[in-house]
Image (tube, rainbow, N blue to C red):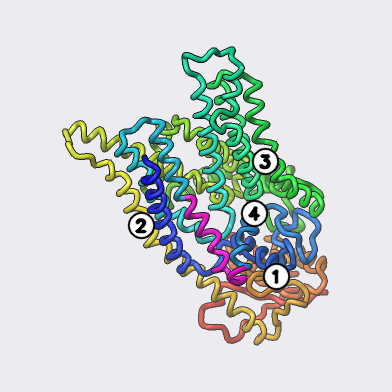
């Protein structure tokens, strides 16, 4: 397409995506789930001048365990840095932080348009169908429920998607440059061929840019390691296409690795100083979890012995559960029917060179989270790394719909092009599910917001006020409590009362436990059945809250020294 048409297409996709995301942000008024609240709360402390610290200790696997807690022992800081920019300008509110994710989510829709255009060009599609695929990819991404939802939650999800898509687009252009030097009239022994494979028409700059994007991705999510691994594999194919052998492959890899390490290196040094290791060691410990609440473990942390003692049937069952979660709950259900069509069609559409890095990233990330982190992935590990994969499924679905419509047209002797039918199906489905389901998610968040807004007054009326200067509070949802009340908060481990009592003793001044009923979790029921629970944890009746608002919370005063 012409430059003018390209800019008009970008403007259309960006405008639709921006309007949809602003509307969605008006419905989502509370940082739900808790990890979103973590990024926002740390951004607030950063803007307030306290630095990268948190008032919540949500996991005990990485020392030092102290307040204020150094932030990001497992997660990574780039989303918080970006969220802090609008918060510094507009105020330290969740609504201000959402502007970062709204803009990045809009960018993801534009990158989907660009990737669709690249695939169309690679396949030499007729101009009309190529334009339809490109614009359709962007517009479907603009209204696609999973992408819209996480475009108004200022966490790592959409930022990581934008960086993954950016890396894939750069890798595709490096591959295109390499293929361009393999003409029949070129002498394979000419040193200019090797030079061109590394850098003709800006290839060197693109490899460096790819490295910078990989470094930024590494500051966003740990799954950037699988993106970098995918580049190592893709670079080998590019070097083979260009006929430059192992030396050219090494230059492509090193050319991206050096800028990536320069970007990530300072953060690795900070982690080494703050936590004693440049790597998120606790993330590896999560691979030994047998249940989701193991992440909150205090006296019974996951160990290799306990993990192996669970037995092969249990370990296989965890992986089956993780597989179903990643496949159905993350990829298929939120994007029905487009995600299902794209997934079924993917074995055929994935052969596109423009998809190569994205497909490798998708396969490796899906396999690693399913096989190595089957429990953690049910709590969001794959979900927060999957937005770029959703874009892959969108384009895959539109490709197969385009081919199907073209085949029907030839069979029925249609004389007018109807390639727009495929994108219309995707846009219609996206609008329907987003309009129906997003308000429900917003209402659930509003209920959580109202609950934590009512809690301080109810506790004060009950004689146990939440005072930021006093000892910490133990809570089932420590990040939400710390974010809304500014009270130092410890995660409630899913362990017997004696373990919770030991936790309270480790943090002097801790006298309050706030629990919430969960799925097969010990608390709050064990406080009324265990002897130590009965003796040391006395229920606190909540006084004067609005009807039903605090029904899901149970408060206990610790009475044993």
550 or 183, nearer to the observer: 183
Q: Which residue is mark 1?
A: 48
Magenta-drawn stretch contains 98: yes
Query: Label for residue 259?
Result: none
Prevailing secondary structure class for the magenta stretch in the rendered image: helix
Marks 3 & 2, CB-CB < 8 Å contact = no
Q: Quadrant of the C terminus?
A: bottom right
Q: Which quadrant would residue 66 be assigned to in this image?
A: bottom right
Q: Which residue is mark 2?
A: 431
Q: CA distance from mark 2 to mark 4?
A: 30 Å
Whichever of labels 4 and 3 marks the residue nearer the N terminus, that label is: 4
Q: CA distance from mark 2 to mark 1?
A: 39 Å
- Residue 87 is left or right of residue 329, and the answer is right
- Asked whether residue 31 appears in the rendered view, the answer is yes
Looking at the rendered structure, the secondary structure element under dot 4 is helix
Query: Label for residue 260?
Result: 3
Q: CA distance from mark 3 to mark 2?
A: 38 Å
Whichever of labels 2 and 4 marks the residue nearer the N terminus, that label is: 4
Disc 1 crowd, CA 10 A, few/some/many (<14, 14-19, 20+): few
Marks 1 & 3, CB-CB < 8 Å contact = no
Looking at the rendered structure, the secondary structure element under dot 2 is helix
Badge nearest the viewer, 3 or 2: 3
Q: CA distance from mark 4 to mark 1?
A: 17 Å
425 or 163, nearer to the observer: 163
Q: CA distance from mark 1 to mark 3?
A: 30 Å
Whichever of labels 2 and 1 marks the residue nearer the N terminus, that label is: 1
Q: Which residue is mark 4?
A: 78
x and y, in percent, of residue 157 in the image: 55, 52
């Amino acid at each position: 397409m012409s430059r003018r048409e390209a800019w008009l297409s970008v403007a259309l996709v960006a405008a639709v995506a921006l309007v949809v995301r602003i509307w969605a942000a008006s419905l989502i008024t509370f940082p739900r789930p808790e990890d979103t609240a973590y990024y926002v709360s740390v951004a607030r402390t950063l803007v307030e001048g306290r630095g990268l610290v948190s008032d919540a200790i949500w996991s005990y696997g990485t020392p030092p365990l102290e307040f204020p807690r150094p932030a990001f022992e497992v997660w990574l800081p780039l989303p918080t840095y970006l969220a802090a920019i609008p918060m510094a300008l507009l105020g330290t509110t969740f609504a201000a932080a959402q502007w970062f994710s709204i803009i990045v989510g809009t960018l993801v829709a534009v990158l989907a348009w660009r990737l669709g255009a690249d695939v169309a060009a690679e396949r030499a599609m007729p101009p009309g169908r190529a334009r339809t695929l490109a614009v359709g990819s962007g517009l479907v991404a603009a209204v696609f429920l999973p992408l819209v939802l996480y475009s108004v939650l200022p966490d790592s999800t959409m930022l990581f998607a934008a960086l993954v898509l950016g890396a894939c687009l750069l890798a595709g252009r490096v591959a295109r440059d390499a293929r361009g030097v393999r003409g029949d009239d070129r002498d394979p022994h000419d040193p200019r061929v090797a030079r061109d494979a590394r850098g003709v028409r800006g290839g060197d700059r693109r490899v460096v840019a790819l490295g910078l994007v990989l470094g930024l991705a590494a500051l966003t999510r740990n799954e950037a390691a699988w993106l970098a691994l995918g580049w190592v594999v893709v670079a080998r194919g590019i070097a083979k296409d260009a006929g430059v052998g192992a030396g050219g492959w090494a230059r492509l890899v090193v050319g991206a690795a050096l800028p990536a390490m320069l970007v990530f290196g300072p953060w690795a040094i900070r982690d080494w100083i703050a936590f004693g290791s440049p790597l998120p060691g606790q993330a590896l410990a999560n691979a030994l979890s047998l249940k989701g609440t193991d992440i909150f473990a205090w006296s019974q942390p996951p160990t290799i012995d306990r993990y192996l003692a669970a037995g092969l049937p249990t370990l296989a069952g965890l992986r089956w559960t993780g597989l179903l979660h990643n496949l159905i709950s993350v990829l298929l259900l939120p994007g029905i029917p487009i995600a299902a069509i794209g997934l079924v069609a993917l074995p055929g559409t994935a052969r596109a060179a423009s998809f190569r890095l994205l497909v490798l990233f998708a396969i490796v990330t899906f396999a690693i989270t399913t096989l190595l982190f089957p429990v953690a992935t049910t709590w969001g590990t794959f979900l927060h790394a999957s937005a770029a994969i959703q874009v892959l499924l969108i384009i895959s679905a539109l490709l197969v719909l385009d081919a199907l419509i073209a085949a029907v047209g030839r069979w029925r002797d249609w004389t007018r092009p109807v390639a727009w039918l495929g994108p219309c199906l995707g846009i219609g489905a996206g609008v329907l599910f987003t309009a129906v389901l997003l308000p429900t998610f917003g209402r659930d968040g509003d209920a959580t917001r109202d609950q934590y807004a009512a809690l301080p007054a109810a506790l004060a009326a009950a004689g146990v006020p939440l005072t930021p200067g006093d000892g910490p509070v133990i809570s089932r949802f420590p990040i939400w409590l710390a974010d809304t009340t500014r009270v130092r908060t410890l995660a409630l481990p899913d362990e017997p009362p004696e373990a919770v009592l030991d936790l309270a003793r480790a943090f002097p001044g801790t006298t309050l436990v706030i629990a919430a009923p969960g799925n097969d979790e010990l608390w709050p029921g064990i406080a009324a059945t265990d002897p130590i629970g009965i003796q040391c944890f006395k229920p606190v009746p909540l006084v004067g809250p609005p009807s039903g608002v605090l029904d899901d919370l149970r408060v206990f005063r610790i009475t044993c020294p």
